Image (cartoon, rainbow, N blue to C red):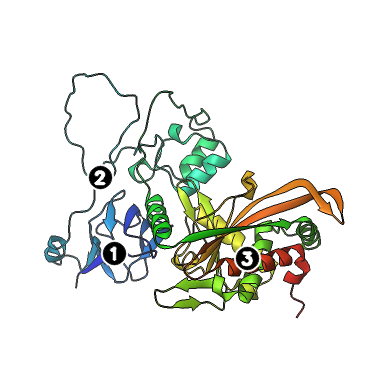
Amino acid sequence: MAVAVKMPKLSDTMTEGVILKWLRNEGDKIKQGDIIVEIESDKADMELEAFDTGVLRKIVVPAGGKAPIGSLIAVIGEAGEDISSILQAAPAPAKAEPQRSSSPEPAPRAVSVAAPAPVFPQPVEQPIDGRLKASPLAKRLATEHRLNLQSIPGSGPLGRVIKRDIEAALSGKTSSRSPIAVKPGTTEEVILSPIRKTIAARMAESKQTAPHFYVTIEIDMEPAMAFRTQLNNVFEAKISFTDIIAKGCASALMLHPQVNGTFLGDKVRRHHYVHIGVAVALEDGLVTPIVRNCEQKGIGIINQELRDLVDRARTRKLKPDEYQGATFTISNLGMFGVDEFAAIVNPPESAILAVGAIVEKPVVKNGQIAVGHTMRVTLSSDHRIIDGVIAAKFLQDLKKMIENPASLVSIT
């Protein structure tokens, strides 16, 4: 019996998906559990397994096409089986984004009308942001090696630049190191990526529905700096300040469950565990991979898990359960030299911590002016369930823990 393969819901905020690549062709035999297609959601690139055994009879949405959640993307059935009823019930798939270019406002001129392009064109896809379509891994490799994506021909779906294209460029088979030119006096329009659409919707919802307020505190980071150096020297690890802050937040949240809660209209759900999301910047947005049960884990384990999550987040290989379900989020812009900022609460969480840079500055110690290192953190809170005093007490305990980092090490 023929079965419909539908666009899955790969995240709690996903509304549509993009077909990156079909791994099977029409007519291929499929076994239950075979990976048949790669799909781009608003958070990650995912592989979809077949839930049935048979023949891939029809690909409804080709590579590059978009489809809303629950819509038909393919049909699996027996060879020769009538699948017309399934196809007739399916709406037409969305078209691929059209090619556009940026330019100053042109003078009137004659326009020639060309034949209409196919719905899913096969030549290189040139988005309106002026760059070639590229996989997240290709973008990261291009950035690391200072390659110009625009000069690299893509061999993926719709001309998408993928890993092997970057490797070819590095081997000298393509010209790639010319800078991307921006013509002064021009404008451009950039179509929002799925992840940017989701960020826009969720952040607008957060600011409109959750009354934000902000509390900032300054932390003496010299003890934490010494603590981090000792850990890295003794264990040959690469502990980051984010790891230490995450552990400090987990410990402080267990003392202040109000800050670790979710607003549910007529009630509040307080979580007696701490799943910390850490904001990771991507080229077209950000994701928040989650380290779960941080209150039960040491700094070394948090470091190991977070490094793995961040690496896979940047290549869009996270699984849905690795970026859904955080109870608290940390956003750290300190590495960019930002002294202080306020973040927007990530719903349905009730608070988010914005972490600034560690700054060398004059400080007063024992009545004397000395050179010190401090860091400012700002807690953004949902005032429906968190009051100013609660936020201040949470930050007070967080400050105490980071300034006394031995308190973050369990000896039992």
Residue at x 54% of width, y 66% of height:
328
Local secondary structure at mark 1: strand
Q: Residues within 10 Å of mark 1 (few under 14, many from 20)?
A: some
Q: Residues within 10 Å of mark 2 (few under 14, many from 20)?
A: some
Mark 1 and 2 residues: CB-CB less than 8 Å, in contact?
Answer: no
Q: Which is more toward the observer, 67 or 405?
A: 405
* Among the two numbered marks 1 and 2 on one chain, the one whose residue lies closer to the N terminus: 1
- Give the answer, above or below, for where 148 lies relative to 355: above
Q: Which residue carries the number 2 mark?
A: 120
Residue at x 70% of width, y 63% of height:
399
Q: Which is more toward the observer, 127 or 50?
A: 127
Query: Percent position (x, y) of residue 190?
Result: 37, 39
- Give the answer, above or below, for where 322 lies relative to 139: below
Q: Residues within 10 Å of mark 3 (few under 14, many from 20)?
A: some
Residue 46: assigned label? none
Please, what is the three-letter code of the amino acid marked with disc 2? Answer: Phe
Q: Give the foreground label among 3 and 2.
A: 3
Separation (CA) of disc 1 from disc 3: 62 Å
Please, what is the three-letter code of the amino acid marked with disc 1? Answer: Lys
Q: Which is more toward the observer, 284 or 3?
A: 284
Q: Give the foreground label among 1 and 2.
A: 2
Q: Which residue carries the number 1 mark?
A: 29
Q: Which residue carries the number 3 mark?
A: 392
